[in-house]
Image (cartoon, grey):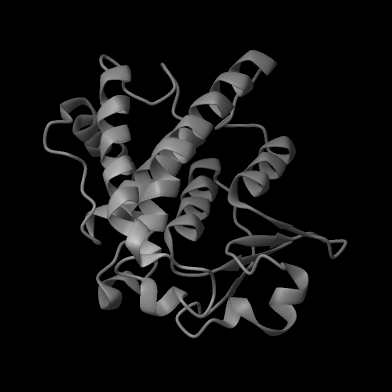
Amino acid sequence: MLLFNSFGPNPRATRMFLLEKGLTIPQREMDIQHAENRQGDYLMANPAGQLPALQLDDGRVIAETVAIWEYLEEKHPKPALIGTSPEERAETRMWQRRVELNITENLYAGFRFGEGVEMFKSRIMVRPEASPGLKAIAQDRMAWLDKLIAGRDFIVPNRFTIADIILYCATDFGATVGQTIPASCGNLSAWFKRIDSRPSAKASLHPAWETIKVKG
């Protein structure tokens, strides 16, 4: 297998997933600053042009972050980051989707249409006028989640899962691009500190972040 890796919150989340799993996969570094992922052989292998992507031994390429994780968890079920039973997996996927649809997709789009517009305008359709609203939705939904996780250590009750990885990498990225966890969200802030203390959190950071000054 070969993992196409780069700077960015989703590639970072995949590195964090691998660290938590104790897995090592050969990697090919992609230069997203110069849009290497939007041209040539990579775009033929992954028409979405996004990162990360996983090339299997038979040449097939699996893109989309969670699809990669689902595949790897089936191959390496322990430790379980999605679940050990149909019930656990369904519960994790429910919270994963809640986190993505309510918070992370809005946070990322708010950045791409705002601070990141110069980088992304030649790659995807951007709507700068939508950026403030998307950021406001992400903030509102963080406040919504803050109430739901009261008394919990993790997003999914009693289990560290991919839902925690997804939200942690998004909010750590967000804090460096002007989208912090609202000060009123005490539960979410405490959750963030717990995840931030895991060895995989710091170890998953791309070396480029110290130059770019953005967590990815």
- Indicate the quadrant containing the N terminus: top left, top right, bottom left or bottom right: bottom right
Q: Residue 213: x and y, percent?
A: 24, 71
| Residue 161 visible to an observer of this rendering | no
Quarter location, residue 130: bottom left
Q: Residue at x 55, y 46 (%)?
A: 22
Closest to the observer, 198 or 56 = 56
Q: Residue 186: x and y, percent?
A: 15, 28
Closest to the observer, 215 or 80 = 215
Left/right placement of residue 26 relative to residue 132 reads right
Residue 60's place in the image compared with 86, above or below, is below
Q: Residue 168: x and y, percent?
A: 35, 43
Residue 191's place in the image compared with 37, above or below, is above
Q: Residue 51: x and y, percent?
A: 57, 64
Q: How many marks?
A: 0
Left/right placement of residue 199 relative to residue 80 reads left
Q: Residue furthest front?
A: 129
Residue 163's place in the image compared with 10, above or below, is above
Q: Residue furthest left?
A: 183
Q: Residue furthest right?
A: 58
- Indicate the quadrant containing the C terminus: top left, top right, bottom left or bottom right: bottom left
Quarter location, residue 151: top left
Q: Residue at x 40, y 55 (%)?
A: 108
Q: Residue at x 26, y 40 (%)?
A: 139
Left/right placement of residue 53 relative to residue 45 reads left
Left/right placement of residue 157 relative to residue 144 reads right
| Residue 60 visible to an observer of this rendering | yes
Q: Residue at x 46, y 49 (%)?
A: 16
